[in-house]
Amino acid sequence: MEGEYIQQRLLPKLVAEQCKMLGVECVSFSADWMLRLKKNDDSQWVIGYHFDINAAAASLIAKDKVAAYLALSAAGVPAVAHYLVKSTGSQKVPFADISLLSNEAEYVMKPLYGTSGYGILKHPSLSDAIEVIRDQQGEWAVSPYLTIILEKRCIVLDGNILCSYVKQAPSRTGDMVFYNLGRGAIPVDEPATQQERELAVQGARACGLRLAAVDIVTLESGEQRVLEVNSGIMMEHYARRSADNYERASHVYRAIVQGMFPVS
């Protein structure tokens, strides 16, 4: 798996509880990493934090930061830019793809895949970022550094917002600010504004996703952009915050399970 590893995950328990209420059989495999949901003759799967509700190609787009940005940009959705600078398909950094970018601005290097803010570092210039990436294993992207003052997550299912919350009290490493809950940020429920609702729904649709967790950032200029679109729905830190949060996470997973077994 990519991102942080969590022992004794809540997702299997939350999903099993909702399945019981909805009359859906839930069988666990591989220490709860795989769940088979079955209703009548219809079987659906949950693998990790990914539900059998999105098309395979759409899930792969969301997993890839550059692919997601390209899909968002093509659909006219304001998004934080991500550019590929290293892939395992070639040992060469494709300078041609980033030749129009300014070398004077600050850039952030990011693993092409993965979550939770791991491997993200800021560099004073594009060339500095590329020099560091040259010696790294795996696939990498760069993104122009932006001063983010607020980050909100909206969980979208079939054009509806199931849950939205801001990530308060972000952690700091040097002059980098991380809004990841796994790094200590605190989720505080806050309804999505009309603009945030549109960005979240359009972002999910642009990537071809029925189900998505869309992160929307507010810049110091007041502009809002989609930072990333996630096809996996992880609410571990959110649900552990309080009994109310646990209940809201339950409602989110209930809606997802219902969406996996549409009424015929």
Image: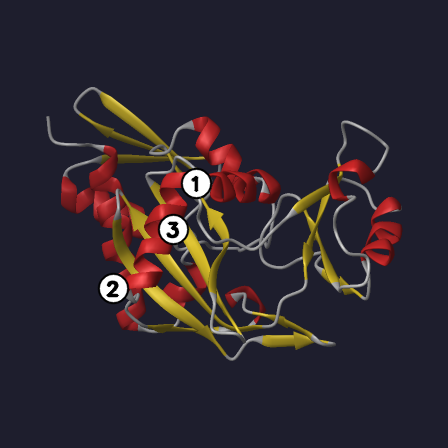
Q: Residues within 10 Å of mark 3 (few under 14, many from 20)?
A: many
SS at mark 2 in the image: helix
Residue 122 placed where, x, y %? 75, 64
Residue ID for mark 1? 75
Q: Nearer the viewer, residue 135 or 44?
A: 135
Residue ID for mark 2? 247
For marks 2 and 1, give the CA distance.
35 Å
For marks 3 and 1, give the CA distance.
32 Å
Residue ID for mark 3? 11
- The reply to whether residue 180 is in sight is yes
**Colour scheme shown:** secondary structure
Q: Quadrant of residue 245?
A: bottom left
Q: Relative to residue 225, is residue 259 drawn left or right?
A: left
Q: Nearer the viewer, residue 229 or 71?
A: 71
Q: Is residue 227 above or below residue 167?
A: above
Q: Residues within 10 Å of mark 1 (few under 14, many from 20)?
A: some
Q: Relative to residue 243, is residue 183 drawn left or right?
A: right
Q: Name the kind of residue labelled 2 in the image.
A: Glu
Q: Mark 2 or 3 closer to N-term?
A: 3
Picture residue at 25% right of the left edge, 41% below the top: 257
Q: Mark 2 or 1 closer to N-term?
A: 1
Quadrant where the image shows the C terminus = top left
Picture residue at 44% right of the left edge, 49% below the top: 77
Picture residue at 47% right of the left edge, 27% below the top: 57
